[in-house]
Amino acid sequence: MLEAPTGRSVRTSENCDLNPFDRPAIDMALRLRKELGGTVTALSMGPGSCEFAIYDAVAMGVDRGVLLSDPALAESDTLATTTALAAAVERLGPYDLVLFGTRTSDSDTGQVGPQTAVLLGIPMVTGAVFIENTESGLTVLRRSDGFLETFALSYPAAMTIHPSAAQPIDAGLSGISTAYDGETVEKWSLKDIGLSPRQVGEAGSPTRVTALNRAKRERKCEFISGETEEQADTLIHHLLEQGLIG
Amino acid sequence: MDTFLSDKHRSVRRSVRTFCEREILPIARDIDQEAAFPWEAAEKMGRLGYFGIQVPQALSGADLDTVSYMIIIEEVSKASASLGLCLSVHNSVAVFPIQAFATEKQKKRWLPPLCRGEKIGAFCLTEPNAGSDAGGIEATAIRDGDHYVVNANKVFVTNGGIADICLMFVRTDPGAGRKGISVLVAERGIPGFVVGDLEDLCGVRANPVCSIRLYDCRIPVDNLLSTEGMGLRIGLAALDAGRVGIAAQAVGIAQAALEESVRYAKQRRQFNVPISKHQMIQSMIADMATQVDAARLMVYRAAVLRDQSKSYSQAAAMAKLFASEVSTAVTDLAVQIHGGYGYSRSYPVERYYRDARVTRIYEGTSEIHRIVIARGVLGD
């Protein structure tokens, strides 16, 4: 959640929620676990107040949750964030797949998944809609405009999961009960992933947000006049022109 | 308001609210108007654990505490009081007495399908001549070998039209007065089990409330809950839990009415300003918000006492009395704030107004609750 005018990101429990774009990744991970076995770990980075997002993931059915949380991580840009996440993934290893949401619902850069894959040195497919296990590795379908691209990958691999690949899943009440009563959620600090404060946070971030201003959206209202049929024709014409239908 | 709630409680609220906004709110108006029980939503709720909220997971329940349970009833009732009622009755006065009084064998038989929502529970106490006066039950169960032969006429059975497992309050010893009442579990479909016509109710219309009649029904002795003569004790224990649930339902309805009123008052303009700028409207909104908060706190207090295994009958009675009175008062103000539109089906507040009214009647009328509370205060 970005708050103007300070330009700094302020995250509190009131404005935090499990990133809706991560839900498809969780859903895909749980589906793959059902098909192929193995375990699923949910990993996130954020202040302690965001711990419940991990609990929500555990409630949805993941086996283990890790929240990477350290004061030194505050003000991390995407590179510092992915440095920390990649170190945490290495620590969680060995692993077969690292799945990400396509983007976040707050900063919306879409960089975290691909950058983490680069740092881990593993192949990455963005916007995956279908994953299938094969003898030599896995086949991944990616939606690209009106086409479906097919990739053959070897393990370990990373991908971001397109929202269309999953149905919304609700955390069952017994899932919530288990998540909070069990010992499935761990909190890691910078020390746990072997990084120094210089590599992350403001110090480890090569980019700076120099200003943050609320974007103004232009709205205009146009009244369509004439007979009902004329109005309908004009409306259809406008919609066609703007590529909204047709 | 909820600073004393745990992260787990908040997670429950978030999860239920998201579900209700997506699955129940869009159909709430239609199921009320058509008096249709929403099976599709109920089945989803069954898979998510809404029908076995406080039952251990080994018996397919969600194993949550009473505070979580109240949060769930409030949130569901906020979207649809009829479904909130269905859940409260199912969990509090059907599932809970089985959990508390049944044998292990009976629990394994009845609880898993009830908790998954595959079977719906009902509580059959009220008769044409017995309601507030539960001792006046006339239904009879006469022992015949390893069966009871039961004749009963139960009216105003909440969930009646869809219930599979009915807790039937019957007289097993006609000469024993209040101590001659027992609870038998009657399963829908046995010969002589007749479901009456649905009541055409003023509110909670999506809940199929109807009469259930048993004509010479042979119910196995294995279906007796606890022992003969325990009926009223089971009933009172169930109703203590049920009252908190109905109080939470009343809070949910009132909260919905408050939110609709705030939304409306901010967009409706009169005398060149939104009506929320008028002090008389502000006064109503302030009273509504305060009363809803107070009612909710009373519900939470009763729930916390129950979770701590402390006596909570008095707290439950007070919460139920207060919350139901608040709910009718707040929904009445909501209609007033909406003016003519509030009296029309174009806006949801008339539904809240109708739904709230019954909370002062079922699971113990306001008058019965005042008797219970006075008895506790006076120590009689």
Image (spheres, coloured by chain):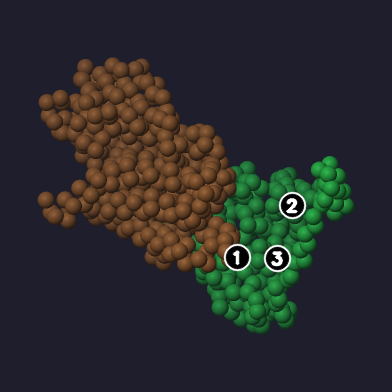
Chain colours: A green, B brown
Near mark 1 (Cα within 10 A), the count class, few <14, some 14-19 or many ≥20, is few
Which residue carries the number 2 mark?
Answer: A128
Q: From the viewer's side, name the closer residue of B364 and B12.
A: B364
User: Residue B272, labelled with which disc?
Assistant: 1
Residue B257 location (% of width, % of height): 47, 53
Q: Identify the subunit bearing mark 3.
A: A
Give whichever of discs 3 and 2 has the lower sequence position.
3
Q: Residue drawn at (66%, 83%), measured in percent from left and top?
A: A203
- Please, what is the three-letter code of the amino acid marked with disc 2? Ala
Mark 1–mark 2 CB contact (< 8 Å): no
Q: Identify the subunit bearing mark 1.
A: B
Front tag of 1 and 2 = 1
Q: Residue drawn at (75%, 67%), measured in percent from left and top?
A: A217
User: Residue A108, labelled with which disc?
Assistant: 3
Question: Is residue A9 rendered to the left or right of residue A142?
Answer: left
Q: Residue drawn at (55%, 75%), measured in percent from left and top?
A: A70
Compared with A120, B178 (above or below) is above
- Please, what is the three-letter code of the amino acid marked with disc 1? Asn
Near mark 3 (Cα within 10 A), the count class, few <14, some 14-19 or many ≥20, is few
Residue A228 location (% of width, % of height): 81, 43
Residue B251 shows in the view? no
Q: Do the residues indicated by labels 1 and 2 lie within the same chain of the protein?
A: no
Residue B207 location (% of width, % of height): 44, 36
- Please, what is the three-letter code of the amino acid marked with disc 3? Asp
Element carrying mark 1: loop
